[in-house]
Amino acid sequence: MPLTLNDLKPGSAGKIKGFADDLLANRMLSMGLLPGKTIEVIRYAPLGKGFYVKCNGIYIALRKQEATCILLN
Amino acid sequence: MHSIELTEEFKLGLIGNPNCGKSSLFNQLTGINQKIGNFPGVTVEKKTGKFALTNGTNISVVDFPGTYSIYPNSTEEKIVVQSLINPKDAFHPDAIVYVADSTHLEHQLLLLTQLIDLHFPIVLALNMSDIAAKESIEIDVAALHKKLGIPIVSISSKTGQGLAELKSALVNLVQNKVKEKPNFYTFNPIEKEVANQVLADFKTKNAYQGLLWAHHSDWLTFLDFNQKEDLKKIQEQHQFNALPLQVEETMARFNHFESLVAKHVKKQQATKSNLTEKIDRILTHRFFGIFIFMAVMALVFQAIFAWASYPMDWIEGIMGYLSQGVANVVPEGWFQSLLIDGVLAGLGGVVIFIPQIAILFFLIGLLEEVGYMARAAFIWDRFMQFFGLNGRSIVALISGGACAIPAMMSARTISNQKEKLITILVTPFISCSARIPVYVVLIGFVVPASTWGIFNLQGLAFLGLYVLGILGALLLALGLKWTLKNSEPSFLALELPTYRAPVMRNVWLSTYEKVKSFILEAGKIILIISILLWFTASYGPSKAMEKAVATAEMQAIENQLSEEDKSNLISSKKLEASYAGHFGKMIEPVIKPLGYDWKIGIALITSFGAREVFVGTMATIYQIGSEEDELRIRDRMALEKDPITGKPIYTLATALSLLIFYVFAMQCMSTLAVMKKETNGWKWPIIMFILMTGIAYISAFMVYQFFS
């Protein structure tokens, strides 16, 4: 299993390697989540299955399945 | 109504990423000279407006929905892209102001570079320059201008700073043809071949537009079947694999402009962003986050439920005063009755919603402006997702407890079409304040006014009805989630904007626009239905009406009734003889299994205008002059006996059945009118009317049969 954003605990960060899904990749890329960027999980969503992340100077809310498609180095 | 879209005017498009302050600039440019509607055929909000340049050119401006890329991920973005790459589109701009947040330039320029390659005359407006200055962000505008080859203006849509420069840049844009520039992005060999072939075959404006037609050929609605087939052939011929190419292109563009930004924008290590992080430590906290959200919603609910009641009372007072005035001026007769009970009642029925709409949208606008709504969507996403709804739906569902009208309108900010639709459709199930008078009259029948421990039983029954409405809404949402087709992938991937002080102008304008669009669009439907209802309740076959009045007068003399009792009796007999009375009797066989007689039938028909009319109609039928006294109506109803069996009509079973009916039934013309406005057609209001009435009928039937 490749390392994905979903494996990160709050407070830890990783470097984006690529995306597991072209359609979601399109969305992430257009928001500035690019390969090579550092992405940090700040906290989980209050009701679970969601991530509050920081990347490229902006804050983004992601669902679990979106986090799973972000591959990390 | 369509004057704003006149084609002779110069058409300017405002384009930018979400949260770039684009709408704020739109408000600065147009003031109240704007109109909010939908793009044709979809429920995507369209804002158009007008302003004039110093040289007298009239500009018609479209504030397009926030968009990240020319490769769209949502219906909203698709609408934007379609307008941009179809020169025949009604909203295809002659020029573009690209708005970007100066404090986040490093990821706001993707779409700009794509628009440059579409050869639009374009001005880059670096917005929020006041905040950028505070954060010591230095942008080398001259160097960027040189590299991008387009005019650049620093502005603040909050303070209005730089607007004059922006307008004079626009004067230049209007007057001068822009020179051809080299493309920002260099095509790879496949892209080049495809783009050039589409350019040659379809005579697109330029090669990049041709490439985009190829990328989007499967969903562009302006292409006909043959064109799509031809585009498909071109793609196959060149082994054009759209998605990976889009990813490649996007990354290449980012690499190019990021290096530009890195070179020409100097940033101190951000201190401001930490503030947002600190605030969110509490506002999106596992426990406090939910608690604070509930507290905020309690405040919103309190505002539309309780505070709005003051202006609503004033409006009722004014409408009563106006009716009195009309009664004094216009001679008694059908015309006076039409004016008072048809037109004024209808107008009152429209105006009465204004306080609730205004207050709700003021508060939502405020929360949206500071950046809190995105957090609410984040917090509730998982729960709402389960029911096929959006995190933002929770605002609609909660405010639906006061009134479905503003609540449904609040669904506008949901960008996923399916989630938006489901939110609009299920909100009317939530028990609104208009159901309260009906519940009060009927609960008094069913539930003894005693207590059970610390709980008042009637209060518990009240709570039960609310829970029933919420369950109905969530179950229907679940059903719709499974049955409705998903036209677009569902994303959260939501930017959580930096917290900022609200621009009050934006809040006021959005409130004003919501009220205006409600009055103009839903208002006329409400007025028409109101007049129709007035007609059915005041007119009947003329012989029957005359006879009714004569009988009533005779009975009044026989029983030596007072003037007041006499006129109450006449109203009651007239209502019975009216078309509404006939309809009531006509539907009696249908509603008999629910335990209702024709009198309740009349009330069901008249209370379609608004649920609370049920109480008023019952008052008229039972010759109680004033509808104020709900207890009197209840007592009078308790005395009512079936003429054949002699048993009381309003038994426990009937009252319960009516209660359940009012929980579920779509007894509100305004809800239908707003649903028509928000879903862009009569399809959904008709389906929901049938569905809700059906659910109400079946559950009322089961309750009645069980308890009788």
Image: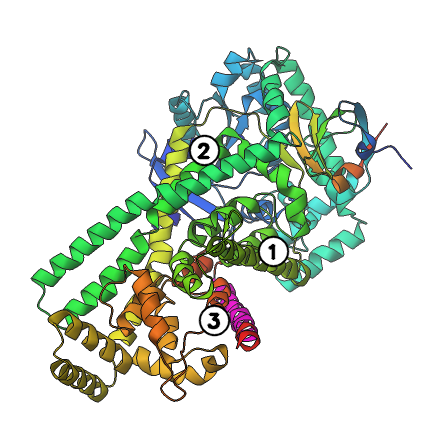
Magenta span of residues: B681-702
State whether residue B404 is above or below residue B61: below
Residue at the (43%, 52%) spot, across then down: B403
- The disc placed on residue B364 is none
Q: Is the residue marked by circle 1 packed among few (<14), some (14-19), or many (20+) residues within 10 Å? A: many
Quote the CA–CA distance across marks 3 and 2. Answer: 46 Å
Q: Is residue B691 magenta?
A: yes
The local crowd at label 2, few if under 14, some if 14 to 19, many if 20 or more residues have their Cα within 10 Å, is many
Location of mark 2 (residue): B366
Q: Point out which mark residue B652 bears.
A: 3
Which residue corresponds to mark 1? B474
Please identify, in this view, whether the residue under mark 3 or under mark 2 is nearer the observer: 3
- Image side of residue B545 versus residue B687, left or right: left
For mark 2, name the chain.
B
In the shown orientation, is residue B176 left or right of residue B380?
left
Q: Are marks 2 and 1 in contact (CB under 8 Å)?
A: no
Label whose residue precedes the other's in the sequence (3 or 1): 1
Could you say whether the residue bearing mark 2 is in a helix, strand or loop? helix
Residue B317 sits above or below residue B178 on the image: below
Amino acid carrying label 3: it is Leu
Place of residue B366 in the rendered image (x, y in percent of width and height, measured from the top left): 45, 33
What residue type is disc 1 on?
Leu
Residue at point 80%, 38% (across, down): A68
User: Which residue lies at the image location 89% right of the left edge and 35% below the top edge?
Assistant: A2
- Calculate the distance from the C-alpha at mark 2 to the C-alpha at mark 1: 28 Å
Q: Tag 1's secondary structure? A: helix
Foreground residue among B263 and B16: B16
Main secondary structure type of the part rendered in magenta: helix
